[in-house]
Amino acid sequence: MSVITKMGDDGESRFLGKVHSKDSCLLETIGTLDEVQSIISVIQLRVTSYELQNIVKDLQGIMGELATGKPVIGYELRVMSLEKEIGEIEKKLPKQDKFLSFEKEGAVYLNWTRTVARRAERVLVKYNKKCQNLDPNILIYINRLSDYLFILAREVESKS
């Protein structure tokens, strides 16, 4: 099957056997999560000191759940894992008492990803309110993910 379907020429997309408008809540939400996942793949090439493959799998799971309505991962456990890692890294960092401007390449990439993850969070909240109720732990997970990306950016920035 060719990637060229010409269906998108009219602003529609076939997704899991159904036709959706390209501006639908579902495609906007999945597309934004896909963007976060893509940037994380870039980070894995640029900032090799972090293993982010679990996050990529988590995002794929969330997109799969949105597409099918079937739970894919245990978000509560993943939230606890992110919180634990955030706490461990935070202990090593100086207290933050001002807005930060990142200058190191890895920190800039991580912060960029954080901002897209925050947008994904806003899109998920909108999806949850206007289109379909989500497992509340998905929203919590995305919120913690952006916190995690921020703390990683701070850690990269603080290394000499």
Image (cartoon, rainbow, N blue to C red):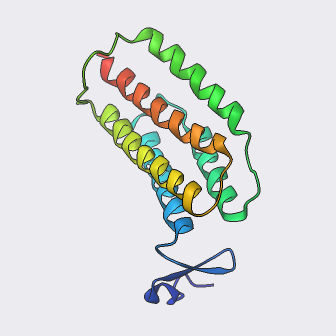
Residue 129, position as x, y percentages in the image: 56, 56
Q: Is residue 48 visible?
A: no
Taking the image as shown, residue 85 lies to the left or right of residue 32, namely right
Residue 81, position as x, y percentages in the image: 64, 26
Vertical side of 95 occupied by 8: above or below: below
Residue 29, position as x, y percentages in the image: 52, 60
Q: Nearer the viewer, residue 107 or 67?
A: 67
Quadrant of the rendered structure where residue 54 is? top right
Q: Is residue 141 visible?
A: yes
Residue at image coords 65%, 55%: 133
Taking the image as shown, residue 100 lies to the left or right of residue 91, namely left
Task: Name the quadrant of the N terminus.
Answer: bottom right
Residue at image coords 59%, 38%: 141
Residue at image coords 72%, 64%: 68
Residue 105, position as x, y percentages in the image: 29, 35
Total tally of numbered discs in the picture: 0
Q: Nearer the viewer, residue 51 or 72?
A: 72
The residue furthest right is 70
Q: Nearer the viewer, residue 11 or 160?
A: 11
The residue furthest front is 129
Residue at image coords 48%, 84%: 8
Q: Nearer the viewer, residue 130 or 66?
A: 130
Quadrant of the rendered structure where residue 155 is? top left
Task: Name the quadrant of the C terminus.
Answer: top left
